[in-house]
Image (cartoon, helix red, strand yellow):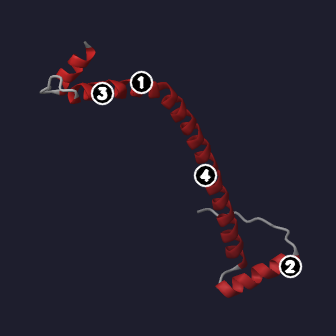
């Protein structure tokens, strides 16, 4: 990876903290600053990804609710038809060998 040198102006107390951490970790001052900058940028990128994902999932949720409102009545009609067939079967009406026979009988 290519390396570019930059000059930073930092408050003296912050430089002191960086130097202490570098000594404790056995790293150079540049390595400590590089790692902190990389972590910060990665956290920002992760936060941005999560924010975008939440936005996408919210839109999916809205679309799912719209689909449910559209198709729920259709499912209810289908369920009601099967309930009617079930009631007819329990009432001793003809027994069917296949579900197709039951559907044909239910549609008459």
Q: At x 27% / y 28%, what residue is drawn?
A: 87
Residue 68, compared with residue 24, is above or below; it is: above
Q: CA distance from mark 4 to mark 2?
A: 34 Å
Q: CA distance from mark 2 to mark 3?
A: 77 Å
Which circle, 1 or 4, is nearer the viewer?
Answer: 1
Kindly identify which residue carries mark 1: 74
Residue 24 found in image quarter: bottom right
Q: Earlier in the sequence, mark 4 or mark 3?
A: 4
Residue 26, compared with residue 91, is above or below; it is: below
Residue 2 found in image quarter: bottom right
- Name the secondary structure under disc 1: helix
Q: CA distance from mark 3 to mark 1?
A: 13 Å
Q: At x 27% / y 15%, what residue is drawn?
A: 107
- Label 3, residues with CA under 10 Å away: few <14, some 14-19, many ≥20: some
Closer to the camera in the image, 97 or 62: 97
Which circle, 3 or 1, is nearer the viewer?
Answer: 3
Kindly identify which residue carries mark 2: 13
Kindly identify which residue carries mark 4: 50
- Name the secondary structure under disc 2: helix
Q: CA distance from mark 1 to mark 4?
A: 36 Å
Q: Mark 2 and 3 residues: CB-CB less than 8 Å, in contact?
A: no
- Label 4, residues with CA under 10 Å away: few <14, some 14-19, many ≥20: few
Relative image position of residue 49 (x, y in whole percent): 60, 51
Q: At x 72% / y 78%, what residue is drawn?
A: 29
Q: CA distance from mark 4 to mark 3?
A: 44 Å
In the drawing, does residue 15 fall left or right of residue 84?
right
Kindly identify which residue carries mark 3: 82
């Amino acid at each position: 990876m290519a390396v570019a040198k930059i000059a930073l102006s930092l408050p003296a107390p912050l430089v002191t903290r960086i130097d202490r951490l570098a000594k404790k970790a056995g790293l150079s001052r540049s390595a400590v600053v590089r790692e902190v900058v990389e972590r910060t940028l990665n956290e920002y990128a992760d936060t941005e990804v999560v924010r975008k994902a939440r936005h996408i999932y919210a839109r999916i949720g809205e679309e799912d609710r719209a689909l449910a409102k559209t198709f729920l009545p259709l499912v209810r009609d289908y369920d009601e038809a099967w309930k009617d067939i079930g009631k007819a079967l329990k009432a001793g009406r003809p027994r069917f060998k296949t579900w197709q026979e039951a559907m044909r009988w239910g549609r008459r």
